[in-house]
Amino acid sequence: MGILNTSHSYGFISILFHWLMAIILLATFLLGLNLKDNFQNYDMVLMLHNSLGILIFILAIFRVCWRWLNIRPEPLASKLILIKLATLIHILFYIIFFVMPITGYLLTNLQGDAVSFLGTQLPELLERNRDMKRIVHSIHDILGNILLAMLSLHIIGALYHHYWLKDNTLRRMNFFNKIKANQE
Ligand code: HEM
Ligand code: HEM
């Protein structure tokens, strides 16, 4: 496997970005859900949630650059509408990588907390405001639900390619699996 993408396969860096960010995003999401009724370890969980969320924002900047610098592997044969849906979901993922951390940052300030990135306090961008907090919380919450729906469709799509169409879509996003030779 090379470092760069080719027209029919993902390179090492794209695969690393994909799985590293998938794990961090999932952890951030679960920590976010845990915050809802967390009275005992709220500050600790909020610090972890904030830090991982900001890490996603930072990694996303590099990932966008990497995607822009590289060729994108051609989608493998499928219905045109499904290819368009998959591409739309990929683009929405990139938007979520930025918008969720931004709304999360503002929400933390609006509820009167300082944002902490791995123990370092970041500047307060907004003052505590209960009405604004309610609105931004709803936006952050709805985006979380949209993310969950997108992720479900994304995983169903990957499994559909792998088990139904039996093509290389999932294999070429994997560090270990060998690409079937008869399919590009
Ligand atoms: C991609 C990154 C992120 C994801 C997927 C995410 C996801 C979530 C989810 C699912 C919730 C629960 C929603 C609810 O309370 O109804 C939540 C709550 C929250 N998130 Fe995030 N979040 C992200 C980034 C951030 C960042 C970067 C910050 C702050 C710097 C942040 C601050 C908060 C706060 C303050 C809450 C409300 C906690 C509470 O209910 O008391 N989030 N997040
Ligand atoms: C939160 C978790 C995930 C996110 C945010 C995510 C995001 C993305 C994005 C943005 C792409 C487009 C390629 C790129 O720009 O790197 C992609 C491709 C892909 N993802 Fe995910 N993904 C996640 C989880 C998963 C999981 C769990 C699977 C497998 C079950 C999966 C399978 C794939 C496959 C097979 C491709 C390649 C699609 C193609 O070649 O057209 N992803 N993913």
Image (cartoon, grey):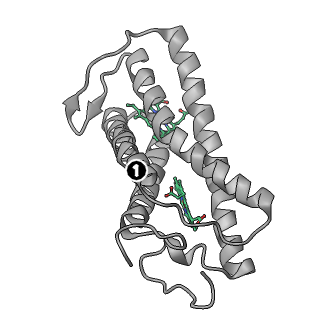
Residue 128 placement (x, y as % from top left): 40, 10
The quarter of the picture where the N terminus appears is bottom left
Secondary structure at badge 1 equals helix
Determine crowd level at label 1: few under 14, some 14-19, many 20+ residues with C-alpha closer than 10 A. Answer: some
Residue 37 placement (x, y as % from top left): 50, 35
Question: Which residue shows up at 39% across the image and 53% down it?
Answer: 66
Left or right of 172 in this view: 2? left
From this viewpoint, which residue is outermost toward the left? Answer: 120
- Whether 94 is drawn above or below 163: the answer is above
> In front here: 124 or 65?
65
Whether residue 12 is visible, yes or no, is yes
Residue 99 placement (x, y as % from top left): 50, 32
The quarter of the picture where the C terminus appears is bottom right
Question: Which residue shows up at 63% across the image and 63% down it?
Answer: 155
From this viewpoint, which residue is outermost toward the bottom? Answer: 181
Whether residue 37 is visible, yes or no, is no
Question: Which residue shows up at 32% across the image and 32% down it?
Answer: 43
> In front here: 120 or 176?
176
- Whether 115 is drawn above or below 15: the answer is above
| Mark 1 within 8 Å of ligand 2, using the beta carbon | yes
> In front here: 90 or 21?
90
- The residue wearing badge 1 is 63
- Whether 131 is drawn above or below 45: the answer is above
Question: Which residue shows up at 50% across the image and 10% down it?
Answer: 130
Count the marks: how many?
Answer: 1
Residue 98 placement (x, y as % from top left): 46, 36
Look at label 1 and name its amino acid.
Answer: Arg
| Residue 19: quadrant of the picture | bottom left
| Residue 102: quadrant of the picture | top left
